[in-house]
Amino acid sequence: MPIPSTLAARLGTGPSQAPTRWSPYARPSVSKARGGAQASRQPLRLDPATARPLGPAQKAAPLGLCRRADRAASDAPSAAHARRRRGSEMASPKSEPKPTPKPNPAAGDPRTPLEEKRRGGGGFAFLCALAGHTEAISGISLPLGSDKLYSGSADGSVRIWDCNSGKCVDVIKMRGKVGCMITHGPWVFIGIQKSVEAWNTQTGMKLSLQGPSGLVCSMAITDEMLFAGTGDGRIMAWNFPSKASNIQPVSILSGHQRPVISLSISARRLYSCSLDKTIKVWDLNTLRCVQTLSEHKAPVTSVLCWDKKLLSSSLDKSVKVWTLSESGNLQVDYTHSEEHGLRTLFGMHRVGKTPVIFCSHHNSNCIRLLDLPSFHEMGTLFSKKEVRTIELADCGLLFTGDCSGELKVWRWAPQDTDQEAASSDAHLFRLNSSP
């Protein structure tokens, strides 16, 4: 999964307690991390931080989805209290709660959004589903200063959604399937076969970055360069921004033997992972590989940076935490095991609390939310099929795109646990999402 730029201050004013996504450009504050790891190993230390925007903050047009989510969060406690009081007056003293049905991930989880909320979504409640894509969603973008949401898919289209109404306002046909998508300021980058298409959502400028010989599977960007991992195992590098309409790569990073499906940047290092079971570390000053990590036993599917640590997921059913040794090389500090192979990692900060990592299971319909540094489970989100892309807006909305083409919207509501309030919210905020 591509790791795009931070979304802080991107969509206007949101709730003060809304979470923020991880960003390789933000630095964690110095504070004491919460324990929870076993005594036999040093616990992973990832401190809460406030993400910094990559560029100057720009006030976006009002975001209807966010306004609805904010209103729900403020109204739910009082409504929930009234419902609970009425319920206690009418309930029989001998009444017993009904058991919660258990899901069957292998057969598809039949649980409704309300039942899923009751089990616990790690603070997230289902808001609505945006239908229109017919194949796997491979990228989600929220450009700076825009009230539009962009989604790319293997069906060969980019859909543009109006955030005020939830409606699809445009469908752009690409030259073949979309392999990935990221955002940098007002720019949206779409990785397709043999090129990266760059759109400036403020000026309308469009660029075509030529050079890849196959499908662009992953991207990452700094303020100076754009990197794209391709299906033939190479990483293309362009100087960006540029005024030219067709930009050729300034460097080609070779070394992987199979598709490069995730890239992440921290400080002056680029991290790439591939289906060849390796992670490579590249020096951004020289664009040379300085280390190859081969501890995973199956294809590596995602890399995620934070400060001096690297997290990686694999189809070998593990998440590995890498830290710098005294020699300056990365080494495995901790390995977390899951019951399924892992497809996507995504990180989120909660204000004043420890970070959260999202782990999307391969060939499954669930995303596990884990607290860091303890790796204790916080909850589970469900989709129709495997989720390949996750994005977070600073107003507290989470977006997940799965292999069925469904784009789900989730609302951050950590204190809203009343079942009837959740049901009321689901009806109140179910937007018109017809294509």
Image (cartoon, rainbow, N blue to C red):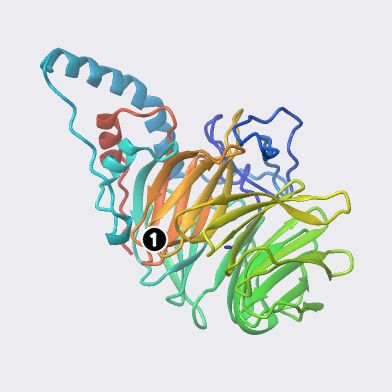
Residue at left 70%, top 38%?
Answer: 42
* 232 with respect to 177 (left or right): right
Residue 6 in sight in this render:
yes
Residue at left 31%, top 43%?
Answer: 116
Residue 8 lies, with reference to residue 365, above or below; the image says above
* 392 with respect to 410 (left or right): right
Between 146 and 248, the residue placed more toward the observer is 248
Residue 62 in sight in this render:
no
Looking at numbered disc 1 in the image, what kind of residue is underneath it? Answer: Ser
Between 24 and 31, the residue placed more toward the observer is 31
Name the residue tied to disc 1.
364
Percent position of residue 324, x then y: 80, 50
Residue 426 lies, with reference to residue 281, above or below; the image says above
Percent position of residue 307, x then y: 75, 46
**As drawn, which residue projects farthest toward the front?**
40
Residue at left 18%, top 19%?
Answer: 87
Quadrant of the rendered image containing residue 78: top left
* 358 with respect to 373 (left or right): left
The total of numbered circles placed on residues is: 1
